[in-house]
Amino acid sequence: MAKRTTHRSTKGKKLYAVRDKEGRFKDIQTYKRAHSQDIKRKSKAEAGKTTTKAKKAKKKK
């Protein structure tokens, strides 16, 4: 994942900005939208942990 820098919009909302190799803005999102998508997605490490926990829970039943 690319490094995000935070900025503020003219209205005062928090923004995340991703830059390309030349330093130009590649993507700008509001913090609210970016954060909600981050919460919905799981990393590979998190996905592996939940599957092992689920397997252990099934064995106990």
Image (cartoon, helix red, strand yellow):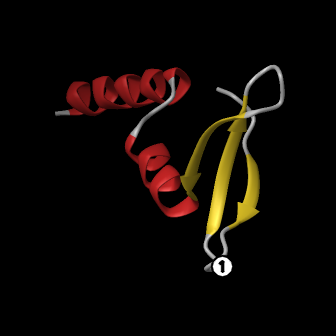
Looking at the rendered image, the quarter that the N terminus falls into is top right
Residue 55: image quadrant is top left
Q: Amino acid at mark 1?
A: Gly
Q: Furthest residue to the bottom? A: 11
Q: Furthest residue to the left? A: 61
Check disc 1 and report its element: helix, strand or loop. Answer: loop
Query: Measuring 35% from the left and 24% from the top, which residue is drawn there?
Result: 51
Task: Tell me if 15 is positioned left or right of 57 in this view.
Answer: right
Say above or below: 33 vs 51: below
Q: Where does the image place residue 23, in percent across and percent down from the top left?
A: 83, 30
Within 10 Å of disc 1 (Cα), the crowding (few <14, some 14-19, many 20+) is few
Q: Which residue is mark 1?
A: 12
Q: Nearer the viewer, residue 10 or 48?
A: 10
Looking at the rendered image, the quarter that the C terminus falls into is top left
Task: Tell me if 44 is positioned left or right of 6 in this view.
Answer: left
How many numbered circles does the render carry?
Answer: 1
Q: Nearer the viewer, residue 46 or 39?
A: 39
Q: Where does the image place residue 25, in percent across and percent down from the top left?
A: 70, 37
Q: Nearer the viewer, residue 2 or 41?
A: 2
Query: Measuring 57% from the left and 60% from the top, which residue is drawn there?
Result: 31
Q: Where does the image place residue 19, in percent across and percent down from the top left?
A: 74, 33
Task: Tell me if 55 is positioned left or right of 8 in this view.
Answer: left
Q: Where does the image place residue 21, in percent across and percent down from the top left?
A: 80, 20
Say above or below: 13 vs 46: below
Query: Measuring 75% from the left and 35% from the top, which residue is drawn there?
Result: 3
